Amino acid sequence: MNMDESYIRRITNFLEEKINDTNSARTLAVQILRGAKEGLEINGISFENWFEDRFKYQFVWLDKDDYSKALVRALWLAPVFAGTDFGSSRQRDMAQVWTDTSRGFLGEIAVSKFLKEKFGIETALDTRRGELTEFLPTDIVKVRFPHEDWRNPHMKISIKTTKFNGRWLDVPGAQIEHSDIFILVKIGILRHHFLAFLKAISFLKDKLFPKAKNLGELNDAMAEELWDEIPQFDPIPAYIAGYLNKNELNLPIHQLICRKKGRTKIRITVTQGIGIFSRETLRNHPRIRELDPDGALRIEIEPIIDSLTTPHFLAHSGGLKWGEENWRRLIERL
């Protein structure tokens, strides 16, 4: 057995505490290990150190109620966002906006659960309707420490969510100027989760299937077969990968790891780094000038941005602060 397979089994066994299907647990285990390795989280430390002190310590389960909250909050905001990508004119289907936005809310709910479970701190998230720019500064609008009243936090905290195999904290546009702390959450959502949720709340059996039978699209046998084929809803794993304090960074580019890539279409690939990445800041960086003195090569952020056109504040997950001591430092300032 190779080392990666041993690691995957450890993570799979942990996830199987709540996920009934072994294949699903293994799929997520492969994803989380890939993201951790590519994000340099397991770099200079042992797998055991990462697994026990980072992954498991900064891990929460999101249940059906959490998913319901995320969907309702996202549905409330989806019409306001009007299907436009932030920083782009591309229009998206409102259902896609709904599910994409719900993933972000799951990340925020995960941070709230983590702070409550580990430190007894309650947080209130911002779910108001309004212009998108109103939500740039902070996702946490109120905090309550044990035996204290609710109050405003002393810092502006932005929570970003990615998939389990993600390696980047990605903050597009001008949000870097508005927030102090950036937290990255990796969510283990599989393709069947939304459909499994519709099954779990009986929408399929009580609403859609009866309608389909009336229309002649399903008979009883087909409905039963379809019902059995749809997976059960399992709790959603959430890994709070870590955080960054903007004021502790040497901006615009705090750290950069890049290389030339390609044989015919040669380009510069940024594989890890921390900072405000734009065409200007990257072209002026000594490492980029060394690789491309003429400034002729295309610059990409692997694997999320094929061609950098607008500024992004980016940080690979291995560059984030993690562990109990760092979280307590953050809480002292919260």
Image (cartoon, helix red, strand yellow):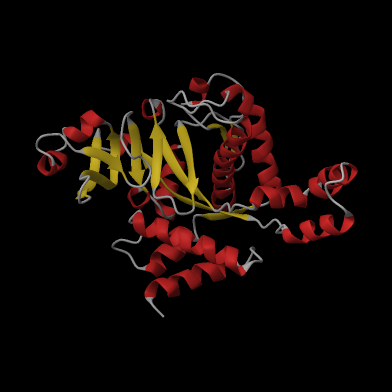
Residue sitting at x 64%, y 63%: 18
User: Would residue 11 be visible to someone looking at this image?
Assistant: yes
Percent coordinates x, y for residue 240 in the rendering: 48, 50
Which image quadrant for residue 224? bottom right
In this rendering, does residue 15 appear at all? no
The answer to whether 99 appears left or right of 48 in the picture is: right
Residue sitting at x 53%, y 60%: 28
Q: Position of residue 282 (x, y in %)?
A: 21, 35
Of residues 183 and 97, the one drawn nearer to the viewer in this rendering: 97
Q: Nearer the viewer, residue 118 or 232?
A: 232
Q: How many marks overall?
A: 0
Q: Position of residue 172 (x, y in %)?
A: 40, 31
Q: Specify the quadrant that holds the N terminus.
A: bottom left
Q: Residue furthest top?
A: 131
Q: Name above or below for residue 242 compared with residue 180.
A: below
**Which residue is situated farthest in the bottom direction here?**
1
Quarter of the image holding residue 81? top right
Taking 145 as reference, is 166 left or right? left
The residue nearer to you, when weighing 219 against 78, is 219
Residue 36: x, y in percent? Answer: 40, 57
**Residue 120 vs residue 153: left or right?**
right
Q: Is residue 80 above or below residue 74?
A: above
